[in-house]
Amino acid sequence: MSILPTTRRRGADDATDRRLPPREGEVIDRRRTVGFTWNGTRYTGHPGDTIVSALAAAGERVFSRSYKYHRPRGLLTASYLDPGTMVQVGDEPNVRGAHRLLTPGLEVSSQNTWPSLRFDVKAVNGLAERFLATGFYYKTFIKPERLWPAYEKVLRTFVHAGEVPPDTDRGYYDKRHAHPDVVVAGGGPAGMAAAVAAARAGASVMLVEEEHQLGGHLRWGGPGDRAALRDLRAQVAAQPGIEVLTDSVVAARYDDNWIPIVQRSLPGVDERLIKARAGALVVAPGLIERPYVFAGNDLPGVVLSTAVRRLINLWAVQPGQRAVVLTANPEGDAAIADLEDAGVEVAAVVDARRGETITAAHGRQGVRAVELGDGSRVEADLLVTAVGWTAPTSLLNQSGDNPVYDPRTARFRPDPARMPEDVLAAGGIVGEGDVAQVVEHADAVGREAARRALRTAGTAVTVPDLAVADHPELFTNGTGGFVDLSEDVSAKDIITAAAEGYDSVELVKRYTTATMGPGQGKLETVNTVAVLAEATGSTIAETGTTTWRPMYAPVTLGALAGRPREPVRYSPMQPWHERHGAVPLVAGQWIRPDHYGDPAGEVTAVRTAVGLIDVTPIGKLDLRGPDVPELLELLYVNKWQKLGVGRVRYGVMCAEDGVVLDDGVTGRLGEQHYLMSTTSSGAAAVWEWAERWLQTARPQWQVHVTPVTTAYASINVAGPRSRELLGRLTDLDLGSESFGYMSVRTGTVAGVADCVLWRIGFTGELSFEVHVPAAYGLHVWEQLMAAGEDLGVRPFGVEAQRVLRLEKGHAIVGQDTDGLTQGFSAGVDELIKLDKPDFVGKPELVWQHGRDTHPRLVGLRTLDGTIVPPEASQILDRAGGIAGRVTSSRMSPTLGRSIGLAQLDRELAAVGTRVTVRLPDGRDVVAEVTDRVHVDPEGERQRV
Amino acid sequence: MSDTAAPLARSPIAPSPATVLDGWEVSARAATGASTLSDETPLAKVLVRAPFDGAGREALGVGFGRTLRTDLGSGAVLLVGSAPGEWLALGAPGTAPALRTALEERLAGTGELTSVLDLTHGRALVRLQGPAATAVLAGVCAIDLADTVTPDGTALRTSVAAVVTDVVRDDVAGVRSYLLHCERSSGQYLWDALLDAGSRSAVEVTGFRGLGSGGTAR
Amino acid sequence: MMLLPCPWCGPRNAGEFKYAGEGGARPDPATTTPEEWRRYLYFHANTRGWVTESWYHGAGCRRWLVVERHTLTHEVREVRDAVQVAREGAR
């Protein structure tokens, strides 16, 4: 039968209708048409068409320009892996044109071609070829470094990739956790049979297929294959325990069968990443047809036999008019039959099993002629190759197996004995056989997978052997050509790399970038290995393969990122802060007011009147039990046995290496009831720390530690008029007699019972820290602001508090100390009680104290008080070396000059010593070491 | 001391529109669909600490990982075995002091170190209910939600949308329902994350449900 | 991500736990030497094989656990609550 195509004019291009009459098994719906544009020109296809099948049906042969050399590229595999058919669709770059289905109105364009796909300047002037030598990443652009921006600009114009416009919608990328008993990777005959068998055995199954329908190669086979397909599909549909995921890919296999699956083609969702934890994984991806390496092998018109069969049988597209077929296996033979059936003239059959071969393909925009091994030349627009198979063993590699090259079948094959219990393989990756044998084998594998996943008692299922067909070893004919069409790596590049000493496959991969493109080596790796083996005079088995790491297929960043999910914490007063112009500060997970527009004014309000700060993030731990004092003695460097009920005390914790861990005050609320406060950032760590000591080292102690950080809204009322303000809202006696400095009381504030108040002084002013049951926090805050209006009350933020505490010389753990600062370098010498029998970190502190060589935390003032050295400015010793650093530095509104704290070598730490501070801009300024307390060194203001 | 307005208790989850119920600001919204998310923060929440396998556990009648509906004298209570040696008792709004007392009485005389703390203000509590609940939760939680693994009455703690959360399966009249509670300060975030995860499943916000059976007020 | 079988919560993703490494016995702080103390702080065998480690189930039961894990295969052969281990050790 011969099909005579009709010719139609489309735009400026000559294009031909290559659509065949209706075929049994085709996946297109001819009753409807779908319109789309390709590089601005209107085209139509049918539902079921891919972008590339619709374009091929319209006679298009060139779909992109290659990555480095800008050579014209056509379709090769007509599948997801097709290296030459990446296109831009609307604002989405790098779309697999041979996989993406047509939908109405798609705007498709070729990527990075200039000025047009047909005529590309970079290819014409040959610039690229001279420019991009083997290993060009390493050779061409190393030096001089200052020219890198220029290099990058040049390189960018060559990169084969689409564009993401900045106003692109962020999309909805979903995530889902799943716990199937069995995941089956691959929905061909083996995958379907394994899934059905596992489901029948009672397992829940996820059956994952990369293509848009189940069936694998049965879909483009003959009548027998189609009958088998109908039967298997019916069996799958009859199992409610099977969840079928098409247009989806098992991206990787991690420890304990943690399996990411990317699901596409979902309504209202761009992509979904399923994080599956499976009882068993059945790897059934089938086989991938391998391209042949020869001169001209990247010309449009050089295609694989499976591509020909897919085009003809799935989309009813005539792939060319006059073909040469190089065949070494039944798939190639079947392609010949399909071609003849589709009206393609088969001008020559080259049978590699008889030792026949081809030399090269010739042409410019596409194949024009094929030179055969006997020297003859055959005019043809299509060269079909069927030279062998690659087993996509990635998921098995990731499970611990290292596939071994088998020369008899000319491919790397898995070793089932090396796979973990919970990973099995079925289908073409194991062996070929006919459909019935493959199904029988997969059925047993599916039953065994279910048995292992469900931990069913009894003996293992006997899995029959699957026949493996011999295949001639055909990788390259030695005439050149490309081994990696995605990355534009030629056989010559591999040989050059080997000659330059990159003679291991892992080195060659990185040096040439072969196998590192969008196909991730599925078409390319074995040919790379074969060419390298030949260049180094070794065998393929000796050369070995590269490691197949995750991901199996490229995954979008959107799929990995999923929904924006960064936990944030808010205080109950956050709505008030937002209404009153607070500038937010991100402190860990907390969103806090940094200031309300005027931090200096906020400082002055606290020093002269009264201010409120929201200190809810301060960590709070409720401690109960008879052994709490023991715990406090262990965790803190100071003493706690004599803390009376109603009193609070400041404490510092060190780790076992003596490094300062955290600080805060702890109050005793009752005989066996304490409330500990920690730094905001240390809340979780201190809790965990306390539990660690209690659970691992002191299990006999009777203590309950319960975090209550956000059970309380915490408000610090600070300033000379704080007592007056708070007194308006509580019946508690706030007088210094009954509620002295460093005391704790509980009572009612603004009508809210069970508030905890402690009188402490981080700011150096008279201040009360009020801990309010959190649901009433906003109420109490608003009452305080209203009641204090005539007193000049102002809210203050973290910045004002930093200034206030710096004026007072209080260190902040993590700012004035770092990961190496031991206790005696933190300015808390008088607190550390080395006469205690034990506490965490004590030995190190004993030794630090004995050596007495440690840096000190000192006050620092520049002689010129208008200069505020940036924090982390270095302090120099007399020889110009580094003697310390400025840890805190601010302009003090109270003193009208700059003040700071510094970590400084012992030799320079005496008060009055003059030191040199080097600013980041290189200037040196002179500063004087001072007492740490810059304001009110006697502490009179906070004790009133 | 001057007169002040009556204190209004607020959940960390901003209600819109708001109404007041038992001194708490709550959502006035009433969902029409089957799958809902409701803010249950006003419920009384009392934490109990005691040895996981001692006389206290006997007295409470439920162990780690399970829930018990009971009445300790303060009204209906959902008692949750939230961790080894840790229980959370949930009761009607305003009953926390009575619940605390009831629990202390129940545990008195065990001879064990027991702590009873009112954490009503320390936690955010939401209920995710309806046919879409499982799918929504599976979007943000790695736990297997199948009946065979986590049936009705299961209590566990895990990471939900990257926040440590107590998950309690508490079906209402045969309808799939989960109580989720986390530290109060993370409440709005968890709420937003659940709504976002459910934005493709038609989960609707509805008003306070309380501990009673499905949908009706307490 | 590997699973860690928590004795309280069952198998959970390792991301729920904090890894705290190999534990060593704490020397007597009254008599220890810098050499001995720093061996306790910083020196670990880093064995290729079975090791005894501390993990903290921070996103679950909040229990410190003593885990016997094979560093090559991630196989876990025993996980016990640290309190139980500490009490046995004290006996």
Image (cartoon, rainbow, N blue to C red):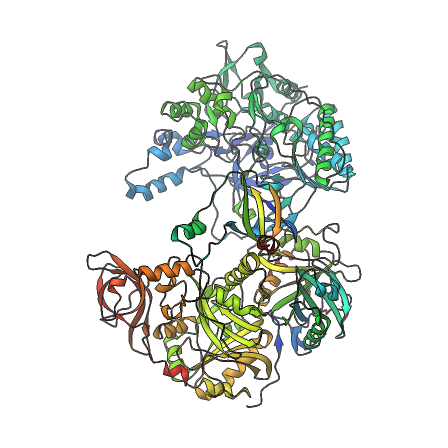
Q: Is residue A302 left or right of residue A919?
A: right
> Who is closer to the viewer here, A663 or A350?
A663
Q: Specify the quadrant that holds the N terminus of chain A.
A: top right
Residue A716 showing in the rendered view: yes
Residue, far left: A879
**Residue A105 location in percent, x, y?**
59, 45
Farthest residue toward the bottom?
B2
Residues A159 and B217: in front is B217
A667 vs A143, left or right, is right
Task: Please say if A886 is above or below A502.
Answer: below
Residue A333 in percent (x, y) is at 64, 17
As drawn, B134 above or below A195? below
Q: Is residue A713 above or below residue A417?
A: below
Quadrant showing the C terminus of chain A:
bottom left
**Which quarter of the picture shows residue A934?**
bottom left
Count of number-bearing discs? 0
As rendered, which of A387 and A452 lies closer to the eye?
Answer: A452
The residue positioned 66% from the left and 32% from the top of the image is A424
x and y, in percent, of residue A768 in the image: 48, 80
Work out whether residue A222 or residue A912 is closer to the camera in this orientation and state it. Answer: A912
Q: Position of residue A774 (x, y in %)?
A: 58, 74
Name which residue lies at 39% across and 50% down: C35
For the question of whether residue A562 can be seen, the reply is no
